[in-house]
């Protein structure tokens, strides 16, 4: 036996059928057994509470007179969710099992009379085996009809507000869909318009023409990110600054070198180059050197370039992707 949150819906239609939705929920239970696990208990509890929390629901709290009132979970949840009892109707079953004159019988009689737990929707008592079933159902139907009417009248202003809001939302979404595109020609025309609008926005972002409402307010982060030319120009400035500060392997200083590993004094660097010249001698005449040494020193000095370029390339790619994504969504 497995519980599920999926809904099985049965619809009855006819000239005499009431405009009513009745939800038959599984009964709450505290502990699991071989046929009902603890996970099933949580599933049932979550399902029941989700319906009870709906302000448009009328809670029919079914209570068995065979069990203690305070031990039945539905009573606790009803009072928590609807503390004033404005939309709770208590249904007491099996009252004929109570011993006549007992404390339990007295308690349930007071409960029906709203002397113990206050519900605005006065409880209905099902007396099994005493009052015929048809009479009991007719009494419940009459009570529910009045309650339902009063509840609908009370909820009607909120329903009308939500309906107007829903109509406005649907109208806006329908407007965004544009004209009908039933034929292939209309679909091609629509795609052409979209591509042209997309190209226009991207071209404006590249050229720095931000008059379209798409670009929004430049003082906001999103507005700035849509201004691709501004983003690129600022990125290039940052890139040039980083290249000046971090784009070389060694920083040659006139004085003593600092503790930084990339700093080297001019005398030490000259000694390094002299040592490299000696170890790279070829057939050059005395006083001359192999010009390829310059290329070797340059390659060594430009080693940080690749990391810096890849870092700023990633920034530019993210900026382009953001513009393309937002322009297409627009």
Image (spheres, helix red, strand yellow):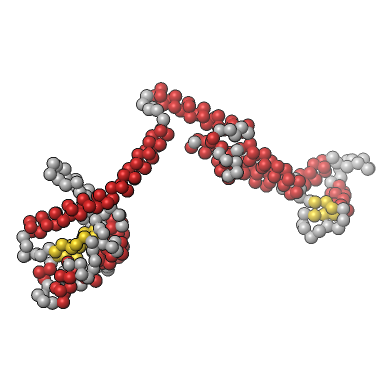
Q: Residue at x 34, y 41 (%)?
A: 164
Measured as percent of width and height from the top left, residue 321 is found at 56, 40
Measured as percent of width and height from the top left, residue 80 is found at 31, 64
Q: Residue at x 9, y 75 (%)?
A: 100
Q: Residue at x 20, y 72 (%)?
A: 68
The residue nearer to you, when weighing 66 against 261, is 66
Residue 183 at least partly seen: yes
Residue 318 at least partly seen: no
In this picture, residue 40 sits left or right of residue 136:
right
Q: Residue at x 23, y 68 (%)?
A: 117
Q: Quadrant of residue 98?
A: bottom left
In this picture, residue 262 sits left or right of residue 74:
right
**100 relative to 193, above or below:** below
The residue nearer to you, when weighing 191 against 282, is 191
Q: Quadrant of residue 120?
A: bottom left
**The N terminus appears in which quarter of the rendering?**
bottom left
For the view shown, which residue lies furthest in the top direction?
Answer: 185
**28 relative to 227, above or below:** below
In this picture, residue 199 sits left or right of residue 159:
right
For the view shown, which residue lies furthest in the bottom direction?
Answer: 102
Measured as percent of width and height from the top left, residue 45 is found at 29, 61
Numbered marks: total:
0
Measured as percent of width and height from the top left, residue 54 is found at 30, 54
For the view shown, which residue lies furthest in the right direction?
Answer: 286
The residue nearer to you, when weighing 301 against 203, is 203
């Amino acid at each position: 036996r497995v519980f599920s949150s999926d809904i099985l819906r049965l619809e009855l239609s006819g000239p005499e059928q009431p405009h009513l939705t009745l939800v038959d929920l599984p009964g709450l239970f505290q502990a699991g057994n071989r046929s009902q696990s603890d996970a099933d208990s949580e599933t049932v509890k979550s399902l029941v509470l989700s319906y009870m929390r709906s302000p448009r629901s009328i809670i029919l709290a079914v209570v068995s007179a065979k069990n203690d009132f305070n031990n039945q979970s539905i009573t606790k949840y009803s009072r928590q969710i609807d503390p004033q009892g404005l939309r709770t109707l208590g249904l007491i079953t099996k009252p004929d099992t109570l011993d006549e004159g007992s404390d339990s019988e007295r308690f349930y009689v007071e409960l029906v009379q709203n002397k113990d737990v206050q519900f605005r929707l006065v409880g209905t008592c099902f007396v099994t085996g005493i009052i015929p079933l048809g009479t009991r159902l007719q009494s419940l139907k009459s009570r529910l009809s009045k309650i339902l009417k009063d509840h609908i009248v009370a909820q009607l202003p909120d329903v009308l507000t939500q309906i107007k809001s829903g109509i406005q939302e649907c109208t806006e979404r329908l407007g965004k869909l544009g004209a009908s595109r039933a034929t292939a020609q209309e679909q091609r025309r629509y795609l052409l318009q979209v591509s042209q609008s997309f190209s226009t926005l991207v071209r404006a972002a590249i050229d720095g023409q931000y008059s379209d409402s798409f670009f929004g307010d430049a003082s906001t982060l999103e507005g700035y990110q849509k201004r691709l030319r501004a983003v690129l120009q600022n990125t290039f400035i940052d890139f040039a600054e980083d290249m000046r500060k971090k784009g070389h392997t060694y920083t040659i200083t006139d004085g003593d070198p600092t503790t930084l590993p990339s700093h080297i004094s001019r005398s030490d660097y000259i000694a390094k180059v002299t040592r490299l010249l000696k170890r790279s001698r070829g057939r050059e005449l005395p006083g001359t050197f192999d010009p390829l040494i310059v290329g070797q020193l340059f390659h060594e000095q430009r080693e940080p370039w690749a990391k810096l370029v890849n870092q700023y390339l990633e920034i530019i790619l993210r900026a382009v992707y953001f513009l393309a994504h937002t322009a297409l969504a627009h």
